[in-house]
Image: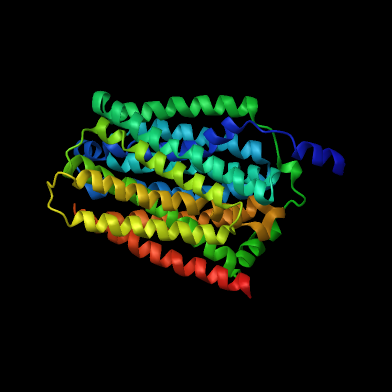
Amino acid sequence: MEKNIEKNKNKKINLSLLICLVGFPQISETIYTPSLTEIAQKYGVQLNIAQMTLSIYFISFALGVFFWGIGSDFFGRRKAMNLGILVYVLGCFLCLASKTIELLFVGRFIQAFGASTGSVTTQTILRDNYSGNERHQLFAKISAALAFSPAIGPLIGGLLGEFYGFRAVFLFLVIMGMILLFWSLKGLPETAMFTQTRVDTKKVFSVGKKMLLDRYTISFGILIGIFNGILFSYHSEAPTIFIEKFHFTQSQYGFMGSIVALATVVGAWLSNRELNHLAPETIITNGIKLALLGAIFLGLTASLPVHFVSQVTMYILGIFILLAGVGMALPNCLSLALVKFASIAGTAGAFLSLGYYIVVSLCTFLISLLHNGSLFVLPLFCLVLLLISLLCIKSVTIKKEK
């Protein structure tokens, strides 16, 4: 029996499928951001109300990762993935058909609940099959590939929104969800057999209690939430910065996704390279310092005259440095977060993801409250978050040294 398990564990899983499954939630999040101003106009609401669709998305996402993460331990990774994608498609249909902002909120909630399986279940599958440096490197490679999901999202969304309107964006998501469901049904194997322990109902909340009392796990959960919160706070504020302040068209703004992608790729490459001679915790610290440099550069750029000829270029450079630092730190946090709960990765991943997506939803909610059209909001907000993250990684490092 053990030989069969080991044989299955070494079986190659289609990496392209895994990348698409873990990436489609990010595409779903970022694809409609170029249309935020249009959505606000069409539904007759203020822009910060339209930005609330981001917060709603992440609140639901947090609940979803908890549900699907635990579910993947009880009824298997494959079923959790396929049922989640089906729910996602239904939510996309509701977004497409919505006539009021309230119905759009409901559609986004359902959409996010289903999409969340792509995040938590895919990570659980990776943790089922890989360990040690191999797992660190695989997370870094997937993070590099994932950089293209926030790039593809705004690019496709900008083009569709500018020429066909925001409803075409939601139609695209319906079609994408159907294709993913078909591919997953055909190509995704069940990997739950590779784990050594299955969690029963009585043990679920005892797992949560253990994680809540573990400073190491809590610190990494906060770090993951902060880094994702920075990324999606950027996507929340970027339409105002580039479309309203710098007068980009939707399609021109869509190409900004390539900057995000390149920054994340560079960050993941730096992380992967340094794994050969540095501890993951040190790489995380270096990533935070690089991101801090980017946030400070953004703040200095924001103080320049509004129509200064080099301001756009300098602002883009600041964003690149900021997100490269995030891309350097994030994959190592994801890889290390559940090392103490490897035998119950699905349930532990559910609690972890619930926690850090609550942090993400809080970040996007706060940035929408702080929104006033100023270029200073994003860099100052990121600066505060990064200083908090430095305290978190310092506490982890001190505990490890002891």
* Total residue callouts: 0
Q: Which image quadrant: the C terminus? A: bottom right
Residue 131 position in % (x across, y down): 69, 49
Residue 52 visible here = no
> Which residue is at the front of the view, 240 or 175?
240
- Residue at 60 percent across and 55 percent down: it is 277
- Residue at 57 percent across and 49 percent down: it is 67
Is 250 situated left or right of 121 in this image?
left
Residue 206 position in % (x across, y down): 66, 64
Determine whether 75 is above or below 300 in the image. above
- Residue at 60 percent across and 72 percent down: it is 399
Q: Which image quadrant: the N terminus? A: top right
Is 201 situated left or right of 162 in this image?
right
Is 16 situated left or right of 10 in this image?
left
Extreme residue in the front direction: 277
Q: How is the image coloured?
A: rainbow
Residue 304 position in % (x across, y down): 16, 54
Residue 311 visible here = yes
Extreme residue in the bottom direction: 402
Determine whether 262 is above or below 49 in the image. above
- Residue at 25 percent across and 58 percent down: it is 299
Residue 38 position in % (x across, y down): 22, 36
